[in-house]
Image: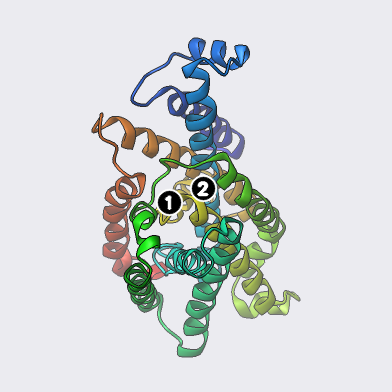
Amino acid sequence: MGTKRSAAALGALLAAALLLSVGCGSQWYTPARLWQALCAADAADPVWRILCFVRLPRTAAAVLAGAALGVAGALIQSVLNNAMASPNVIGVNAGAGLGALLAASLVPGAAALLPGAAFAGALAAALFIWMLAAVAGLSRTTLILAGVTVSSILTACMNTLKLLFPDVAVGSMAFLLGTLSGVTTAQVQRALPWLAAGFVLAALLAADLNVLQLGEDMAAGLGLPVARVRFAALLTAALLAGAAVSFAGLLGFVGLLAPHIARRLVGGDNRRLLPVTALASADLMLLCDVAARVLFAPFELPVGVLLSLVGGPFFLFLLLRRKRSRLYD
């Protein structure tokens, strides 16, 4: 399928998912009823209040978090040359979570610090994995196992913080599971500058990442500053993942699934892959969030749990394929 057709199909799916997201919940509303409430802007109308203070912020959060984690996953896969890498698999999400919990524990009430702290944690985890790959010469499969180990250690650190700071532990369970329930406009707005910077940097890096895919020696021969491009790509991935984690929690496998979907549609050219990945991951996040709301109604399943149920088997599928493809050696 061509790039334009793929983008159009994913855009149409996104429009349908947006309507589902704002219309679905404990109470279902038709698009006509939602439009009527939005146009009237009557603060006494319960539909208007639900739309403006609950469903629109949640929908915006799903789109932005999904797009950010998907693009971060595509960047990490390009830098590490490993199609099994993603922010949650190699510990970037866990690093972001630890940074955010540290900020919440040490500076209570300073919500504005969360995106920056999450970014710092994500960047530290990404650079550590990168150094392991460069210094220890890990194979691609071993690198994934190292990332899983780092993620487990960081998760243990988060659990320790929950024990040491009981006030933080009260609201941290939903954060650790990954949920969009209760996301506010203010939380999304605080992360928006970080997300915007990450998307711009990703677009600027696309052409250089294409050169990097030719191989390190050839890329250096063509004049590409390989180390600088890799660092910039990891920094951008950490920026996007950290910003998403700061308001959506530890959402897994979006950064693994969406880049594979996009590659099937448009190939490996990052100039096309990154925007299509953003669309695919936004679609995936929205649809999973809607499913999490309605599958067990009136109870709501955290969207992170549903993503793990979908992404876990896919990750196992990739692991089982490693012997049949050099990509996973």
- From where the camera sits, is residue 8 visible? yes
- Label 2, on which residue? 65
Residue drawn 35% across and 56% down?
170
Is residue 231 left or right of 33 when viewed as pictured? right
Measured from the top left, where is residue 75 in percent x and y?
A: 56, 61
Q: Find numbered disc 2 in the image and state the secondary structure of the residue it sits on.
A: helix
Q: How is the image coloured?
A: rainbow
Residue 143: name its quadrant. bottom left
Residues at circles 2 and 1 in contact by the CB criterion of under 8 Å: yes
Outermost residue on the right side: it is 223
Residue 177: name its quadrant. bottom left
- Label 1, on which residue? 254
Residue type, mark 1 in image: Val
Measured from the top left, where is residue 251 in percent x and y?
A: 40, 53
Is residue 36 left or right of 26 when viewed as pictured? right
Outermost residue on the bottom side: it is 135
Residue type, mark 2 in image: Ala
Query: 3 above or below 144?
Result: above
